[in-house]
Amino acid sequence: MVINTTALDRTQEIPKLEVSQINKSFERDRQRHTVLKNLSLAVHPGEFVSIIGPSGSGKSTLLQLIGGLLEPDSGEIRMDGSNVTGSKGLISYMPQQPALFPWYTLEQNVLMALDIAESNAKKRGSGMGGTPTTASREERRELARTWLARAGLGGYEDQYPQVLSGGMQQRASFVRAMLSPQELICLDEPFGALDALTRLQMQQWLLSIWEEHRRSVLLVTHSIEEAIFLSDRIYVLSAAPAQTIAEFQVPFERPRDEAIINCEPFIRMKRDIYQLLQTGSGQHAR
Amino acid sequence: MMKKRWFQVGWPPVAVLFSFLVIWQLAVTWGHIEEFLLPSPLRILEVFTQADVRARLWMHAASTIRITLLGLGSGIGLGIVLAVLLHVIPFLRSGIYPLLILTQNVPIVATGPLLIIWLGYGIAPKVVLIMLVCFFPVVVSTLTGLSQPDPQYLNYMQMIGATKRQLLWKLELPNALPYLFSGMKLAASYSVITAVAAEWLGSKEGLGTYIKLSANGFMTAQVFATIVVIVAVSLGLFGIFALLAKWAVRWNIKNGGR
Ligand SMILES: Nc1ncnc2c1ncn2[C@@H]1O[C@H](COP(=O)(O)OP(=O)(O)OP(=O)(O)O)[C@@H](O)[C@H]1O
Ligand SMILES: [Mg+2]
């Protein structure tokens, strides 16, 4: 097994996404509950980063902060170096449920996301928020059809989502996130609702697509194996209030093979992360 | 699961109705009941064979259908516009919606004469009355549909930065469509009855007027024949809206329209 020894020096580079010193609390039963405490993380251009943490630790809340749906109590969110705290439309997003609209066909679902991204990019005057798309609607339609076919959904473009299986819906949902022009994709437990076998197939499929079509990815997951298999870097969060308790650099070279799941370093890393999540603390930074 | 064919669903009520008619017929024949009290089903059927009565029935039905369609159409239009307005302007919603529900407690027998005083004896007061009855179920159901999309869709749309307008067109309005259609089906079934009631309150033509005239002349068979026509028109209108609903929410495979 080849191990990547030339750990990249990313310190000089401006990160695609930088979450710095975020605090967030909610009021519940007249009490403040701190959900995120002094949380910082970064995603570099073209990097695949995972966040792993116990259920209810605040991972979805973090994504909503990044998406601009919520405002942090303090701290800052930067993209490409500029402060974007509270602004919407800068990320593309794949939720845990496929969230394909039942009144749109698969193609219309994908196109809708592209149209919204396009109108956002226009409003911003092709400033931040990633690649300004110059594609016409016809070209976008073509793109959607091509990628749906690549996702094994050829022939289903004009079907309504309800006729598809859960795995097929997730693939369509991923295509929708993937084709949106924003340079950062946020995935919130995208395979959480799938059975183990489908889940494995989906991970391999996602990896093969991503490896030839690099984007900056922030993935939230419950599965340690999934995080190691897919990512370049992993942040481990503690239970509420969530802080980053560790950061792992994943050393396996790409393109990755599913065989790495059984190699020694993989298993060791898996055990380390598992222990961290169990004890809920630690200063394991590498 | 196989979908039930229409005749599988349809035969029990038909069988019950048929037995009922047979019993009615026998009771009238053997019980020597006077025709002006209760005509037999066959006697009612006979009314439809009289050419002059048929012509008059048809003339009155056409008049009723006309005001029904005018009132229903404007009621639905008003309902949709009002629902969208109340939805996009929260202040209007909190200010107007409760009052709207209050207005539904005013009975037709009060509204009808008032409208006649204000709008005269033409078709205007009748159309307005039907409109007032029809727009309410449309507003209520459409507003429900607009304001209750599945939170997962809402979260997704906000995460990708959809504007209020995009939310309305791509999420809330399509989501409201099945609700709108169930409101329209309700409105359609209220509309014919309201038209007849409005005519009964004061008019020169229409099925409601015909019932009044027939009843005053103790022509009970004609009253029943008119009822048959009213039921047929109601069912037809309801059927049209049910079909429209099926078509408009064809993506909704699980409940095939509400
Ligand atoms: N809008 C809100 N108002 C009040 N409390 C909230 C709100 N959103 C989230 N919370 C609370 O914040 C905490 C973290 O929720 P969040 O959904 O972010 O967790 P999570 O890590 O995504 O969990 P899971 O892994 O189960 O998806 C929970 O205790 C939740 O009750
Ligand atoms: Mg979550």
Image: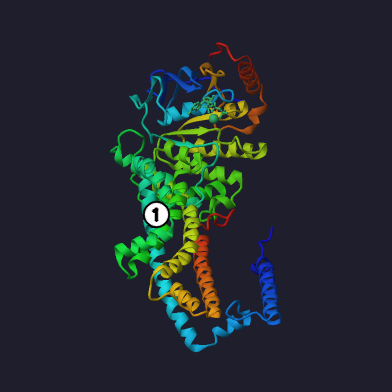
A137 over A4 or under it: above or below: below
**Position of residue B137 in the picture relative to residue A228 (left or right):** left
Of residues B197 and A159, the one drawn nearer to the viewer in this rendering: B197
Tell me where residue A263 appears, x and y as whole percent: 66, 25
Give, as a three-letter code, the residue at label 1. Ile
Q: Residue furthest bottom?
A: B51
Say which element carries label 1.
helix
Residue A56's image quarter? Answer: top right
A58 over A105 or under it: above or below: above
Disc 1: which residue: B80
A224 over B121 or under it: above or below: above
Which residue is at a point 55% across and 76% down the rendered structure image?
B224
Is the shortest distance between ligand 1 and the CB of mark 1 under 8 Å?
Answer: no
Q: Quadrant of the N terminus of chain A?
A: top right
- The answer to whether any part of residue A48 appears in the image is no
Of residues A138 and A98, the one drawn nearer to the viewer in this rendering: A98
Tell me where residue A127 appears, x and y as whole percent: 30, 34
